Structure formats: structure tokens, C-alpha cells
Amino acid sequence: MINKLSMGLATYLKQVDAQNTPSIDVMKYSLYIILHNLFTIISITLVAIIFNEPMATLMGLMYFILLRIFAGGFHLHSSTWCTVLSILFVCIAPYIHFTQMWTLIITVVSVGIIAILAPRNFKGYARIPEKYYPFLKIAAVLIGGSNLFWKDSTLTSILVLQSILLLPKEKGGE
């Protein structure tokens, strides 16, 4: 569905302005990424509204996005699975509750994993030079560590998920 839509949009844009646009394949790829992310965000937002947890869910989504940008992590072999699992985990996170003590323990352990492993699996996915990796690590640790201030169970759940996604060495699939 997203593939067909991105191809249709790319073809249309090329027809409208053939001289000033990149190739259809380049536009299709870029549009696919944009539409895929948009679909995931809209789906998570709708589920959050339906289950009456929009603030916690969207806060968890933003936390996950920020952690993912700076820490990297395992990439699934299928964008469809990525979408389904992202929707599932982000929408379930507000319903997982930890005591203050467990929130603290899990946050410290997860931030420790991030400090050791991040950034992970960027090669082939991000065009960030390796000289910037220490800054990405610091940002990821600060973002993860912010839950020591927030002490939020939803963020703790997201932090655990992101930490787990840093563990596999292989990069997964496209």
C-alpha cells in the first residue's frame, strides 16, 4: 500500500516537473520512508486516542524516536514488521507499571547498556560520520538518563525496548 502510494506520488511529481526533480526511484524511496513513518505515527496516535492514553503514548513515542535517532539499534528485516511492532510496543508501554525502585534500577541498567553499546548499527542506515559517534552516545545517554528525573513507567518500558534493540550485533535487514 505505502509502496504503491510512494510510486504514484513519485511518478506524479516527475510528470509535473521533470527537469527539477530527482529520479523516480530516488523520490519513491524517500517518499516511502516519509509515508511509512507518517503511517506509523498516525496509527500510534489513533490507537492512543481510542484507548484513552494519548499523552503517555505520544510521550513514549517521542522518547523512542529520540533514543532511536541517537542510539541506533537493530533493524528488522521488514518495514511492515517494524511498523506493527512499533505500534504494539509504544501503545502497550503506558499500561506497564513499575514501582519507583524498579524504575530507577531499570533506568540505570538501560542507560548503562546505552553507554556501552550506542550508537549501534548506523552503518548502511545513517550517513553520519563516525567522528560524531561520541556525541551521539552522549546524547543517547542524556535522553535515556532523563528518566531518572521523570521517573515514568512508560519511558522505562520504552528505555528497556531500546536497550534490547542495541544488543544484537548484526544489522538486521532492509
Image: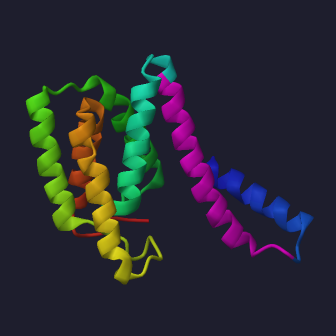
Dominant secondary-structure state across the stretch colored magenta: helix
**35 displayed left or right of 46:** right
Given residues 115 and 125, the one toward you in this image is 115
Q: Looking at the figure, which quarter contains the C terminus?
A: bottom left
Q: Height in image: 20 above or below 47?
A: below
**Height in image: 65 above or below 71?**
above
- Pinpoint residue 58: horizontal percent, then vertical percent: 45, 34
Label tally? 0
Residue in the image at 45% along x and 72% along y: 126
* Residue in the image at 84% along x and 59% along y: 12
In the image, farthest residue toward the right: 16
Which of 155 and 91 lies nearest the eye of the viewer? 155
Q: In this orientation, does residue 1 appear?
A: yes
Q: Residue at x 17, y 50 (%)?
A: 110
Bounds of the magenta segment: 20-48
Residue 42 colored in magenta in the image? yes
Is 91 within the magenta? Answer: no
Residue 55: x %, y % from top left: 44, 26
Front residue of 102 and 170: 102
User: Eyeballing the image, is 105 above or below 4?
Assistant: above
